[in-house]
Image (tube, grey):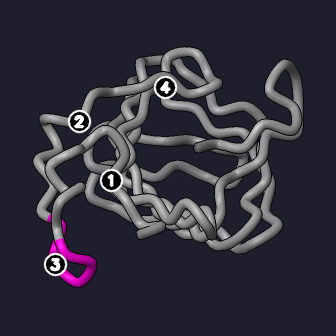
């Protein structure tokens, strides 16, 4: 099966059509290419790149200039995210169309749930050309 919850092995023996109940606390945080931002991948389609993930942003952390290759959806659980277009606060949601580009930062830190049809690609600095996975 191409759709998995990486780092959560309790699903390995399940039949293809079984529901996948994910104990999120059992999934370790892993670093992203951007300092101060960690992620837990909840679901990932290894063939298409579709992904749902939790992101934990340390206060002052920044996601460097990147492009949303396909539609991205984000729900802010705690804190806030800021970019040149505005601020999204806890309890609110933003979606971004394919091809949109921006930096984003979390002045006070944040916990967010994001859904991607394809991973973002970084366009600047040390991470240029890297896809978020």
Within-10-Å neighbours for mark 3: few <14, some 14–19, many 20+: few
Label located before the other in sequence (4 or 3): 3
Mark 3 residue element: loop
Determine which residue is flagged by label 4.
37
Q: Nearer the viewer, residue 20 or 37?
A: 20
* Alpha carbon separation for disc pair 4 and 1: 19 Å
Q: Give the range drawn in magenta.
A: 15-20
Determine which residue is flagged by label 2.
27
* 18 within the magenta span: yes
What residue is shown at x 80% (from left), y 26% (from top)? 127
* Alpha carbon separation for disc pair 4 and 2: 16 Å
Mark 1 residue element: loop
**Of tags 3 and 1, which is closer to the observer?**
3
Q: Do the residues labelled 1 and 2 touch (CB within 8 Å)?
A: yes
At which x and y percent is residue 18? 16, 78
What residue is shown at x 84% (from left), y 19% (from top)? 126
* Alpha carbon separation for disc pair 3 and 1: 13 Å
* Alpha carbon separation for disc pair 3 and 2: 20 Å
Q: Is residue 7 left or right of residue 71?
A: left
Query: For residue 18, which numbered disc appears in the image?
Result: 3
* Alpha carbon separation for disc pair 1 and 2: 9 Å
Mark 4 residue element: strand
Q: Is residue 34 left or right of residue 31?
A: right
Q: Is residue 102 left or right of residue 31?
A: right
Label located before the other in sequence (4 or 1): 1
Determine which residue is flagged by label 1.
5
């Amino acid at each position: 099966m191409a759709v998995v919850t990486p780092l959560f092995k309790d699903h390995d023996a399940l039949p293809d059509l079984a529901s996948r109940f994910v104990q999120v606390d059992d999934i370790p945080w892993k670093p992203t290419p951007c300092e101060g931002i960690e992620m837990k991948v909840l679901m990932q389609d290894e063939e298409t790149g579709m992904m749902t993930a939790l992101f934990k942003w340390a206060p002052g952390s920044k996601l460097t200039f990147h492009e949303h290759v396909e539609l991205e959806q984000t729900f802010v659980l705690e804190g806030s995210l800021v970019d040149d277009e505005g601020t999204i606060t806890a309890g609110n949601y933003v979606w971004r169309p394919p091809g949109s580009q921006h930096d984003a930062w979390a002045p006070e830190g944040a916990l967010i749930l994001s859904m991607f049809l394809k991973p973002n690609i970084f366009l600047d600095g040390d991470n240029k050309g890297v896809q978020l996975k």
